[in-house]
Amino acid sequence: MTYLEVALKVTPAHRAAAAAVHEKSRQPYLDSDLFTRAVAAALAPPPEAAPGVRVHDSH
């Protein structure tokens, strides 16, 4: 199985704002033509499950 993970280092003071951006943009990106034609196509054969996005806390 292959995972695509994006990790950002965010200070505690900005963590809530970063989480809000993530929540607002995650699904529109996964539904976008860019994701469908570029990312999903490059992952052929198709993934066995829906894409997952992970946000890790470094504490």
Image (tube, helix red, strand yellow):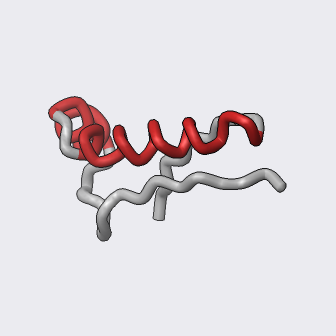
Which one is in front, 22 or 39?
22
Q: Is residue 1 above or below residue 25?
A: below
**Residue 24 in the image, given as x and y percentages of width and height:** 36, 42
Specify whether 59 is left or right of 31: right
Question: Which residue is at the far bottom?
Answer: 48
Tell me what residue is drawn at x 66 percent, y 54 percent: 56
**Quadrant for the C terminus in the image:** bottom right
Q: How many marks can you see?
A: 0
Q: Is residue 55 above or below residue 37?
A: below
Question: Which residue is at the far right?
Answer: 59
To which quarter of the image does residue 15 belong? top right
Tell me what residue is drawn at x 79 percent, y 51 percent: 58
Which one is in front, 50 or 28?
28
To which quarter of the image does residue 35 belong? top left
**Residue 12 in the image, given as x and y percentages of width and height:** 76, 41
Tell me what residue is drawn at x 29 percent, y 38 percent: 29
**Residue 19 in the image, given as x and y percentages of width and height:** 53, 45
To which quarter of the image does residue 40 belong? top left
